[in-house]
Image (cartoon, grey):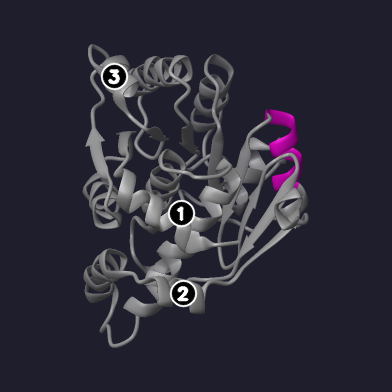
Amino acid sequence: MDIYSYLKAVREKKPLVHHLTNWVTIYDCAQVVKSFGASPVMAHAPEEVADMAGMASALVLNIGTLTTEFVESMKIAARAANAHGIPVVLDVCGAGATPFRDHKSFELMKEARVDIIKGNASEIARIAGRDVRTRGVDAAAVREDLADIARLLAKERECVAVITGKEDIVADPASLFLIRNGDEMMGHLVGTGCMAASVIGTFAGASPGGLAAAAAAGLACYEIAAELAVKGCAGPASFKERLLDRVFHLTEEEVSSMQKVTAEGAAAR
């Protein structure tokens, strides 16, 4: 898999990535998209979300700081994206923590097509129907095989399922990608998961191939930048600054030599 070709496509096409996202991390989501060479827009008013989604290359939804009104705007934007054939990414942030988050996640998926569902292990397990609880927005232990959960969710929802963690898992009904890049420092920085969803949307919006491959490539590039950024950093604050710089300067040589992506199923052929 030529990971760099996906990054090159982002830099050349400069996709517009429309967000209705987590207010805690909204700046970081915008900046990581910009650092990759794309264009972020953070528009949430119900009066304009359909228009904005209609001109975008991808739509990213994140329920991290959800309200009923915010989810209604998400539905409008997602239906507009569906009508224009624009990929929709849903970060089910905190699913499994409260019944309200679970209900709104399922409501979104019922009322609009979601092309990529992203979350940590317990969030995705909950969306896949498992009886698990998420610790706020932090992953809780899941006893079942995560790759199997991702595959089953992808088949059930006819989507791409993404589980982020020490080893990222990206599955569609026919393929499975495993990404082993990244660094544990990412777990000490608020927002790296939300940023990952924005990266996935960015790569999906410029994808020269399928959405699963685009998601895998985006995560690999983002996490390679993290591996480079952690060298010499003093802690989470300096890591964040260096991460955005490394994303901006990421080279073909770095991506090609450092990527740890394996593919199974149709993607491997």
Question: Which amino acid, by three-letter code, is at mark 2?
Answer: Glu
Residue 24 appears in the rendering: no
**Magenta part of the chain:** 149-157
Q: Is residue 174 magenta?
A: no
The percent position of residue 211, horizontal first and vertical second, equals: 56, 42
What residue is disc 2 on? 184
Q: State the quadrant of the C terminus.
A: bottom right
Q: Nearer the viewer, residue 90 or 69?
A: 90
Query: For the point 63% across and 36% down, which residue is it?
Result: 127
Q: Earlier in the sequence, mark 3 or mark 1?
A: 1
Query: For the point 28% across and 74% down, which residue is it?
Result: 239
Query: What is the C-alpha distance between the residues marked 2 and 3?
Result: 36 Å
- Would residue 12 appear left or right of 110 to someone viewing this image? left
Q: Nearer the viewer, mark 3 or mark 1?
A: 1
Q: Is residue 169 above or below residue 249?
A: above
What residue is disc 3 on? 49
